[in-house]
Amino acid sequence: MYDGGKIITGIIIFLLFATFPFYYNIGKANVKPDPKLDTPVIKQLAEKKCVESKEYMRANHMQILDDWRNMALREAKRTYRNAEGKLFEISLQNTCMKCHSNKNKFCDECHKYANVKPYCWDCHFVKEGGAAK
Amino acid sequence: MFEKALVGSRRYWTLVFVLLGIIGIGFLVYLKQLSYGLGITGMSRDVSWGFYISQFTFLVGVAASAVMLVIPYYLHNYKKFSKIIILGEFLAVSAVTMCILFIFVDMGQPMRIMNVLLHPTPNSILFWDSVVLSGYLLLNIVIGWTTLQAEWKDAPPPKWVKPLVYLSIPWAISIHTVTAFIYAGLPGRHFWLSAIMAARFLASAFASGPALLILLALLLRKYTKFDPGREPILAVSKIVAYAMTANVFFLLLELFTALYSGIPGHRHSFEYLFLGLEGHGKLVPLMWISVFLALGALFLLIIPTTRRHEKTLTWACIMVFISLWIDKGFGLVIGGFVPNPFEKVFEYWPTLPEFIISIAVWAVGFLILTVLYKIVISVRESVGPGEPAH
Amino acid sequence: MSMDRREFLKFIGLAGLGLGIGASATGWIFSRGLEASEYIPPPGALTAKRWAMVVDLSKFKTEEDYQRVIDACHKIHNVPDFGNPKDEIKWIWTDTYEHTFPGQENKFLPKEFEEKPFFLLCNHCDNAPCVRVCPTKATFKRSDGITMQDYHRCIGCRFCMAACPYGARSFNWRDPRPFIKEIDPTYPTRTKGVVEKCTYCVERLAKGLQPKCVEVSNGGLIFGDLADPNSEVRRILNTHFSLRRKAELGTGPSVFYIIGGEEDV
C-alpha cells in the first residue's frame, strides 16, 4: 500500500469525527419525555379530547398545524370541522394553547428530546412558563 | 485536474490563507447578523436594499466578461482569444458565485431561501433571476472545466460543449436583462422606471467585466509564466472602450430625459446623487468621483496611443472598474430609494459589519478565482507552450 | 455476484430511486388528512367581493383623534415601537398632504390642508405590485381584495418594499418582541427578517368585526364592499369627490380619501 501511514491516519481521524456524537453524549442521561395534559382547562373538560384522536394528533400534529395555517391564512378558511362534525377556530395561540397552556411540559418536552426546533414560537406568543393566558 | 490547486508556491498559499482568513472573519460577522437581524446593516424602512444588493447588481455585470470573449472567438473565429477565453469563463464563475452569496446574505430569513423553488412564482422577476443566475453559473463551470480538461489531455473538447457555448451567449444577455428588470418594472420608483435600464446594464457590464479581465490577465503575466499576449489584450481594450462610451452615452440619455422634462420624480434621484437634496448628500462626492473617473477612462481609452500603451491602459481599466463600481455598485440602487415614496429624503450608509461581510463575499469570489486560475496556469505549464487545441 | 463499475452505479441509482418512491408513497399515505374533516370559512364572518376603505378627514379634528386610531391598531397587532426611523414598523400612520400625495403639491392650498394629517396605510391595490414581485407568494391576493402577508413563507428579500409605491411595508430589521410595550396574547408577534403591513384586520373580519381602526374612528373611517352598490362606502363615494394615492400608476388602490364630509347627503 502506498502512503499507508497517511491513509490509516486519515481513516482514524474520520472515524473519530464520525463517531463524535457518541462520545459527546456519553454519561448524559437521556430522560424520557413526559408530556403532561394536566392544565386547568383540560381538567375541566367533560370529554378530554383534542380536535382529532390522540393517536392521530400524536403522529400528525405537525401536518395538521401546517394545514391549519395554510387554510386559515391563505384560504381564509378559519374554521375546522373535525371528523365528528365539531367546529374549532383555527388558531395556535387561541385554540391549541388555550387547553395546552403548558407549553413547557406539552410541546417542549418531546421537541427537546427529539431535537426538533419548530419556529412557531418566534411569532406565536406564549407567556413565560408556557401559558398563553 | 483539481489536484493542481493543491500544490503551489509559497505566494499562492499565502494568498489562499489570507483570503480564507478574511472569509472567516466575515463569516463570524455574518453569524452576528444572523442572530441580531439585518438591522446590523445601514438599511432602513426607506432604503430597504443597500450595499449587498448593489454589489450583486454590479457583479452580474462582471460576469459578462466571458461573453465578450466568447462572441469573437466562437462566432467570429477570432483565434487570438483562445488563451484568455478560459479566464473570462472562470471570472464569470467567480462573479456569479458572489452574486448568489450577496443575495443570500441579504435575506431576512436565509434558511427559507428554498421557498423560491418550493413555491415557484413565474410572475416574480426574482424567481427568474435565480433561474438565469444558477444556469449561467452551471454553464460556465461546465464549459470552462471541459475545455480546460481537453486542453490538458491535448485533445479537442467534446462536441457537446459547442451548443452549450452558443447557449451561454444569449444566457449572458439574459442575466443582465433579468437583473435590470428587477428594477425597471417597479411602478413608483422613477429612477429605475426606464426602458433603457437593461441596455445600460449591458453596456456597463461589457465595460467593467472586460476591464477587470485585462487587469487580471496583466496580473497573471506579472506573477506567473502565463502570457496572454499583446494582441488579445488590445482587442479586449477596444471592447472596453466601446462599451464604456455606450454606457456614458446611456447615462446622459437618462439625465436628459429627467432634467429636460423637469418632472420632479424623475429629477429628484439625480439631484440627490449629484447635488444633494434638502441638505442631504452623502453620495455626492462618490458620484462625482465616478464621473471624473469615467471621463478620464474614456479619454485614455479613446485615444489610440494611450489605449495601446500598457501602463495607461492599466490605469484606464482601473478607472473604468472603480467608476462603474460606484455607479452601479452603490448609486444605482441607493438612488432609487432616495427620495422615498413620500418624497422625503432618508439617507443610507453601510455599517462596518455590512462592509466586512461584503468584503468577505468578495474574498470568496477572489478565492474561487485564485484556485481556478491556478489550475489553468498549472495545466498550461504542464502542457507546454503552443496553441491550445480547442 | 460480480458487477463492474457501470452496473454497480446503475444498481445504486435504481435502488435510490426505488427508495425515494417508496418513501414518498409512505409519506403520502400517512400525510393524508382525515377523510371526514374539512375547512370552512368561519360562520358569521364579514365577507365581501372587494373590501375598501374611505377616510373621511373631516371627522378627525384633534391630534388625539388620529393617535387613538393608530394606537388601537398597533396595540392589538403587536406592532413594536423602536423609537427610531431606521427600524420603524408601522401599519397605519399620518403625514401631510404634500407627502401623502406627492406630485400633487399646491402652494395655494388653504392653510388647514397644508398641515392637516392624512392617514396612510396599505392600499390593498387591485393590481398590487408587491404581489407581482414576491418570489414565494408570501404576499398574495385574497378573493375579497385583501393583500395578505404570509409570515411563515416570507424569505425577507424585501422586493415587495421596493415595489410598493406607497411605502406601506415595514421590515423586521431585528427581533420586535422587546419593543412591544404590552404583547396582546391573542395575536402573534412577528419574527426578525420578515415584512409586515396592514391586513385590513382579516382576523377580526373572520369574527364578524370591523377593522379595529374603523371601530375606534368615530365614523371617520368607513369600511365596506366596493362591489356592492348599496354598501356604505359606495354610497359615500357616489356623493363625494374622492382622492386616491398615486392612482396614475394603475395599481388600483382601495383606500379613498374624502375631504369635505360635512355636506353629507
Image (tube, coloured by chain):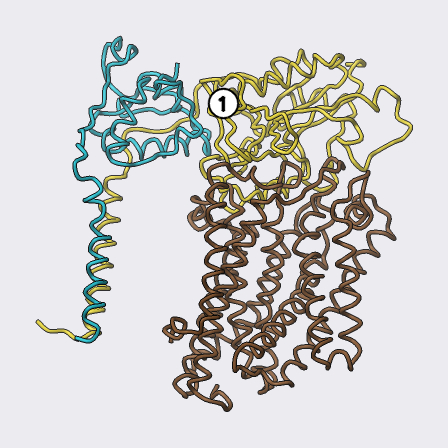
Who's the residue at 68% across and 42% down the image? B348
Farthest bottom residue in view: B386
Spot occupied by residue B379 in the image (x, y as percentages of width and height): 43, 81
Depth check: B141 or B216 in front?
Answer: B216
Q: Residue at x 76, y 13 (%)?
A: C61
Above or below, B307 relative to B320: below
Q: Residue at x 68, y 81 (%)?
A: B234
Report the chain shown in brown. Answer: B
Do we see residue C64 in this rendering? yes
Residue that appears at 34% across and 29% down: C38
Among the 4 quarters of the image, the one containing residue B91: bottom right
Q: Residue furthest right?
A: C108
Q: Residues within 10 Å of mark 1 (few under 14, many from 20)?
A: some
Q: Percent x, y for residue C42?
A: 43, 22
Quarter in which the N terminus of chain B is drawn: bottom left
With C116 as the anchor, is C190 left or right in this view? left
Q: Who is closer to the viewer here, C231 or C144? A: C144
Chain in yellow, by letter, is C
Give whichever of C68, C234 is nearer the camera. C68
* Residue A23 figure quarter: top left
Residue type beneath disc 1: Glu
**Residue B172, horizontal then vertical, whole percent:** 57, 67
- Which residue ends up furthest to the left in the rendered image? C1
Count of labels in the image: 1
The answer, for residue C35, to whether it is visible in the render is no
Q: Secondary structure at mark 1?
A: helix
The image shows residue B259 at horizontal and vertical percentages of: 85, 52
Q: Which residue is mark 1?
A: C203
The chain to which mark 1 is attached is: C
Left or right: where C183 falls relative to A121:
right
Q: Is residue C147 above or below residue C1?
A: above
Chain identifier of the cyan chain: A
